[in-house]
Image: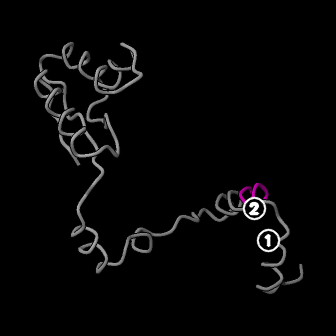
Amino acid sequence: MAKLSTTELIDAFKELTLLELSEFVKEFEDTFDVTAAAPAAVVAAAPGAAPAAAAEEQDEFDVVLESAGEKKIQVIKVVREVVSGLGLKEAKELVEAAPKALLEKVDKEAAEAAKEKLEAAGAKITIK
């Protein structure tokens, strides 16, 4: 088999569709028992960038149900109020899957209101 140069390989990859390239990557990973995922150190933000981001005022919050406590039925009812569009079955499954995010990327007022209602029903809540 003739050895291909890096340039020739890149040119060949340019001709592939995304689906074909994805299939190639999967087969390459399987054949050589490797992964194309970037190492965590490469994906993580630079150390100097983290304090600057933390200094900014957070404007989006996640409301996380840590546990339902002893009043599970009351918590399920409040979850149905707080999370729009949930039926009884979905709310029950959500409560039983704790710890679980109930609301994501909501403003501070909505997060605090949801936390207050849920804690009044007996749930343990954290806001992130």
Amino acid at circle 2: Leu
Which residue is found at the position 31% from the left and 77% from the top? Answer: 49
Q: Which residues are magenta?
A: 18-23
Q: How far from the left and from the top, in percent, is residue 119?
A: 12, 28
Left-right relation of 110 to 85: left
Q: Quadrant of residue 43?
A: bottom left
Identify the secondary structure beneath mark 2.
helix
Majority secondary structure in the magenta region: helix
Q: Residue at x 44, y 74 (%)?
A: 42
Please tell me the numbered disc located at residue 21: 2
Tell me the residue that label 1 is attached to. 13
Point out which mark residue 116 bears: none
- The amino acid type of the residue labelled 1 equals Phe
| Between discs 1 and 2, the one toward the N terminus | 1
Q: Quadrant of the N terminus?
A: bottom right
Residue 103 percent across, percent down from the top left: 32, 37
Name the side, left or right, on which 9 lies relative to 114.
right
Residue 37, image x, y percentages: 53, 64
- Residue at image location 23% in from the left, 74% down from the top: 51
For residue 123, which quarter of the picture? top left
Q: Tell me: residue 23, above or below residue 90.
A: below
Residue 50 position, x and y percent, is 28, 72
Q: Residue at x 71, y 58 (%)?
A: 22
- Give the colouring mode of the picture: one colour
Q: Please name whichever residue, 9 or 85, is drawn nearer the observer in this view of the structure.
A: 85
Mark 1 closeness class: few <14, some 14–19, many ≥20 residues within 10 Å: some
Along the line of sight, the residue nearer the viewer: 70 or 23: 70
Vertically, is 112 above or below 47? Answer: above
Disc 1, disc 2: CB below 8 Å? yes
Q: Indicate the quadrant where residue 20 lies.
A: bottom right
